[in-house]
Image (spheres, rainbow, N blue to C red):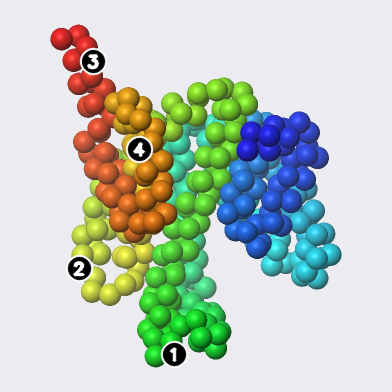
Amino acid sequence: MRFLASMAMRSRSQAVMAATVLAILALPLPPLSIPSAGIVALVTLRRGMREGLLILGLAGMACAALALLLFSHVLPVVGYVLLMWLPVWLLGGLLRINRSLGATLTVALLFGLLVLGGQYLQSQSPVDAWRELLAPFIESLVDAQVIDAGISQQLLETMAGWMPGSIAVGFVLQSMAALITGRWWQAVLYNPGGFREEFHQLRLPRALAVGTLCVLVLNWFSPEVGLPTYLTMLLLSGWLVQGLALVHALQRQTGTSAAWLVVMYALLVVAMPYVVGALAIAGFADSWIDFRTRLGSSGKSDRTG
């Protein structure tokens, strides 16, 4: 990964090439969209928004040419890569100015809110729209005998019901993952150890915690999955990121083995819903209790005592 970042920073052409190749490979391998957008973030963070936009534009044109050559379709591919890169470019420019991951994450959540609102502007009922889009996919699973026809309708309704919120959450988490990748690369190349300190201090504003409480209360009185549920999902994605920062910070402050972090990320894969919920709750609680400061204060008291 360091080699990729180093290569991208050698010249403009190499940054364009790396971002383009990774973006095209991300079509069959979606996780590669994160390092692709991470390159845009790295250039923006290091050289400014103008240079980042230039890389974005040149790589976008390169993707268009490759899409025309490989798939005979330009707009879907270009739209996909711009959706990956543009938010990360904006967040990278913001982080370059404010030097606060917490404030930048707050703006990313606002972007997620726009994604959620856009679905409602596009269709009065996003669930109905997703139901129409997912129906052929579910039918193909039934035809391939992957799922039983008897549960296909129930599966369709469940997936369509959760998709509006899931798309907004995925947008925020992918954008932040790419931004964090770019920030980490920047630290590795130019400021070793700097990213760790910055990430450990990541904190969302208290006002967002108050807003989350209001949304949780609203969701409690909503009998069905709907807008309050989607807002809750979106806000919890932000607290998830703060929860991850909290765990990393506490691991360093307490001096426990880094193996605990490996265990946590392994559990994120095998027991995702439970671990994600626990981390989001921990991040939300940290906004009120401030575990990092309290632990640091108690540690200093123990040493002076």
Residue shown at the point (19%, 9%) measured from the top left: 304
Which residue position holds label 2? 221
Depicted 171 relative to depicted 201: above or below? below
Looking at the rendered structure, the secondary structure element under dot 3 is: helix
**C-alpha span from label 2 to label 4:** 38 Å
The one of 133 and 189 positioned closer to us in this rendering: 189
Which badge, 3 or 1, comes first in the chain's sequence?
1
- Nearer to us of marks 3 and 2 is 3
**C-alpha span from label 2 to label 1:** 34 Å
Q: Does residue 124 appear left or right of residue 191 in this picture?
A: left
Depicted 136 relative to depicted 39: above or below? below
Q: Residue furthest top?
A: 304
Which badge, 3 or 2, comes first in the chain's sequence?
2
- Counting the numbered discs, the total is 4
Which residue position holds label 3? 300
Amino acid at the residue labelled 4: Trp
**C-alpha span from label 1 to label 4:** 43 Å
Which badge, 4 or 3, comes first in the chain's sequence?
4
